[in-house]
Image (tube, rainbow, N blue to C red):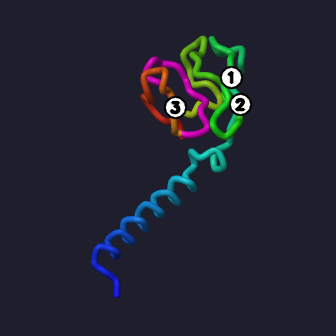
Amino acid sequence: MLRSGTCASAAAWLKLAAVGCIFASSSFGAAGRELKEPDEQSLDRHGHYESRDGSSVHQPARTQDGSKPEGASARCRDDTWSFSHTHSGTCSRHGGVAIWIK
């Protein structure tokens, strides 16, 4: 026989699993979103960093004309564009995320 707390715990775990499935299948995930490299000539910075999954990611940068560059995933609060492949850590050294790009 199950205790009532066990059912509540199981229900909580099911909710967490459902949220995880929704996030994993969202269009922002690297697997569900086409990742494009930005045009280097339009950016003020040209470096890359290695993400946690081992992929190379263009560092946040500004465009010469202020427009959204190809491949941007978010706009940071310092007006740089992020090309991050995941939500985790995006714009962390740039004041956080101002807006997400779909």
Question: Residue 15, relative to residue 30: is it above or below?
Answer: below
Q: CA distance from mark 3 to mark 2?
A: 14 Å
Q: Residue at x 59, y 30 (%)?
A: 72
| Total marks placed | 3
Q: Amino acid at mark 3?
A: Thr
Label 2 crowd (10 A; few <14 / some 14-19 / many >=20):
some
Query: What are the residue bounds of the magenta stretch?
Result: 75-86
- Does the residue at mark 2 contact the one at mark 1 (Cβ under 8 Å)? yes
Q: Residue at x 65, y 29 (%)?
A: 70
Q: Amino acid at mark 1?
A: His
Is residue 73 shown left or right of residue 37?
Answer: left
Determine which residue is flagged by label 1.
48
Percent coordinates x, y for residue 14 in the rendering:
43, 68
Task: Name the mark on residue 56.
Answer: 2
Task: Look at the numbered disc 2 and give the secondary structure of its residue.
Answer: strand
- Does the residue at mark 3 contact the one at mark 2 (Cβ under 8 Å)? no
Location of residue 61 (image quadrant)? top right
Is residue 19 shown left or right of residue 40?
Answer: left
Percent coordinates x, y for residue 85 in the rendering:
61, 38
Q: Is residue 29 magenta?
A: no
Question: Residue 56, relative to residue 40: is it above or below?
Answer: below
Task: Look at the numbered disc 1 and give the secondary structure of its residue.
Answer: strand
Q: CA distance from mark 2 to mark 1?
A: 6 Å
Question: Residue 59, relative to residue 3: is it above or below?
Answer: above
Determine which residue is flagged by label 3.
90
* Image quadrant in which the C terminus is located: top right
